[in-house]
Amino acid sequence: MTAIRTARERAREELTREIKLEARRQLASEGAQRLSLRAVARELGMASSAIYRYYPSRDELLTALIVDAYTDLADTADAALAAAPTTPRARWRALCTAVRGWALAHPHEYALVYGTPVPGYRAPQETIEPAARLPLALIAVAREGRPDTPAQDTPAPPAPAGPLGEQLARLRAELAPDLPEAVLARAAIAWTQLFGMIGFELFGHLAGSFDPADAFFAHAVEEMADLVGLPAEV
């Protein structure tokens, strides 16, 4: 019975992989808004009723694709950090470059998670953890650039006040209690700048200006490292 069960599990895993692979093809050709379980089943030669045993709705298939995209991107970033030199600025550069490289290699998956929201789809709780891995990695590198014992004559940057200050205080308590709120704000600015810049490049908004965008991207990464407060390399 164990062998039969294992064979069934392997068959299910393989068919699940094929379903998601075909769904990604549809993302590329039709876009996320037109993703259809029936069309996926038809392309795989399945009965339309059979695919619902794997994904009961289009939204559940979308969720699986979103989780896969976030996870693959974060794994790529983690691998880049593991191979990077030990200085915070070099690690920041490696992380940002890896994110851009993944986006250029997976434009449709990038558009799925960072592009226009799919009408009628509401991301469930299970997408939050994989989505958070990359910003947490950026925060971790920003933390690496903080001195262990700041000089007495170097005042801490003032924390933003008002609603932003309240948001930062909450995020700091949850994510980075040892990081000043002003530095956390700068890391968030760099995070949104990174993805905005990649989105502009990916969706053709840099054509006629910074295209190809290699030099512009490299310069922006260094500027963002300065903003976050990472020490210069010597």
Image (cartoon, grey):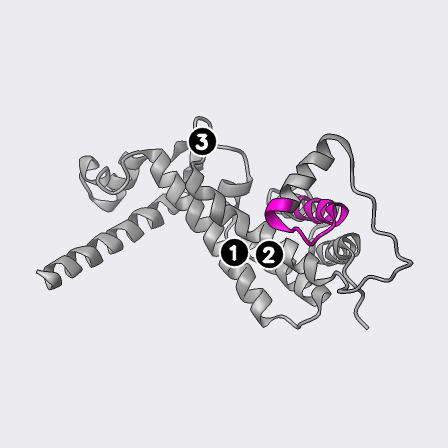
Secondary structure of the residue carrying tag 3 is loop
Q: Earlier in the sequence, mark 2 or mark 3?
A: 3
How far is mark 2 from mark 1, CA to CA? 8 Å
Q: What residue lies at 62% left-to-right and 60% top-to-bottom?
A: 95
Looking at the picture, does residue 86 appear above or below residue 230?
A: below
* Structural crowding at the residue carrying mark 1, measured as other residues with C-alpha within 10 Å and reported as few (<14), some (14–19) or many (≥20): many
Q: Is residue 42 magenta?
A: no
How far is mark 3 from mark 1, CA to CA? 22 Å
Instruction: Write the start and end of the magenta stretch as one range.
Output: 173-192
Query: What predominant SS class does the magenta segment belong to?
Result: helix
Location of residue 60 (image quadrant):
top left
Indicate left or right for 221 with 131 as reference: right
The disc placed on residue 122 is 3
Indicate left or right for 209 with 24 as reference: right
Location of residue 6 (image quadrant):
bottom left
Residue identifier under label 1? 74
